[in-house]
Image (cartoon, helix red, strand yellow):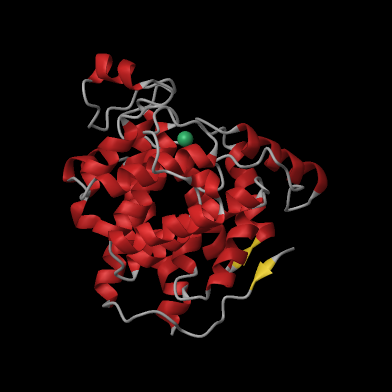
Amino acid sequence: MLVLDLSTELIGAAVPADRLRARAAGAYLGLAVGDALGATVEFLIPREILEQYGVHRELLGGGWLKLRKGQVTDDTEMSLALGQAILSAGTVAAGPIATAFSDWMRRKPVDIGNTVRRGIAHYRQTGETQVPESDYDAGNGACMRALPIALVTLGADLEQVAAANRIQSHTTHHNALGDAGTLTVLRMVQAALQGGRRDHLKDLADALVAQAPAYRYDRRRMENPGGFLVETLRAVFQSLFATDCFEGALIDVVNRGGDADTTGAILGMIAGALYGVEQIPRRWLAALDPKVAAACRSQAGALLAMSPQCRG
Ligand SMILES: [Mg+2]
């Protein structure tokens, strides 16, 4: 079983504790509202969204999954399963994480990606907590659920963040391009939690592009992003850097259609950390499933409290 030792020296600037907690709550609630907002228009193309909703900007439910208003999907549910596994184990360990994902699948989730299903089946059949490396595993399913890693490793050095991310990602997705994209999202969330501004986040996105040019996001507008993480992050980066508030960023990304619940979830965690919970529209927070909202708030605080940054 892979286990990560989180004991490390404190790095990172001193951000007031209440400010840090508000940003962490913003990241987790941002993930959930982005998921719920985007799910309504998942698999639609922008023209269909325009015809059916005008500009889609409310948590309505519906969509191809026939969701209740304010209901979230696998993006948020798997994040909460991962977060709970880390909190229960007291560390980032592959065994408890794989078990948590397997238990989640047994509860018959409203949606589940093919790569995730295959990875969990592999764990059940073999007991192995890592799938073999595969060119086909650069889907966005490991990135969409990665937020608990950003919170629990805040203040750790980069290689420890990367190691923790590999532990959770490789339970279902084992691909270097995917790992690089997901690690960048985690770094962006952590930079925002520590007070980094949008320009700092852009530097991180640009460093990813320098390392893995597939992620270039400065060319044509990414519409109908699919499940490939490269497409997902192109849309996320374009929306994040073209807007200057949480609501504007989220509306911009979900109206691109495609895998809109996951672009919404990933942009929601970054923008929530950047702008803070107070910038998430109250009408979205009010519509969000209350049990999910409570779990997001509770895990955000508990994971942050476990982090090297907060334990000092
Ligand atoms: Mg989903």
The picture places residue 147, in percent across and down from the top left corner, at: 46, 56
Q: Position of residue 195 (x, y in %)?
A: 29, 69
Q: Which quadrant is home to the C terminus?
A: bottom left
* Position in image of residue 5 (x %, y %): 62, 75
- Residue 164 lies left or right of residue 10; in this view the side is right
Up-down relation of residue 150 to residue 104 (above or below): below
| Residue situated in front as seen by the camera: 64 or 175 | 175
Q: Nearer the viewer, residue 24 or 286?
A: 24
Q: Residue at x 23, y 31 (%)?
A: 58
Residue 273, located in which quarter of the rendered image? bottom left
Q: Quadrant of residue 59?
A: top left
176 sits left or right of 123 in the view: left
* Image quadrant containing the N terminus: bottom right
Q: Residue at x 41, y 35 (%)?
A: 261
Q: Nearer the viewer, residue 311 or 44?
A: 44
289, above or below 10, in the image? above
In the image: residue 49, left or right of residue 108 = left
The residue drawn where x is 17% and y is 45% is: 282
Q: Is residue 67 above or below residue 234?
A: above
Q: Is residue 126 left or right of 222 when viewed as pictured?
A: right
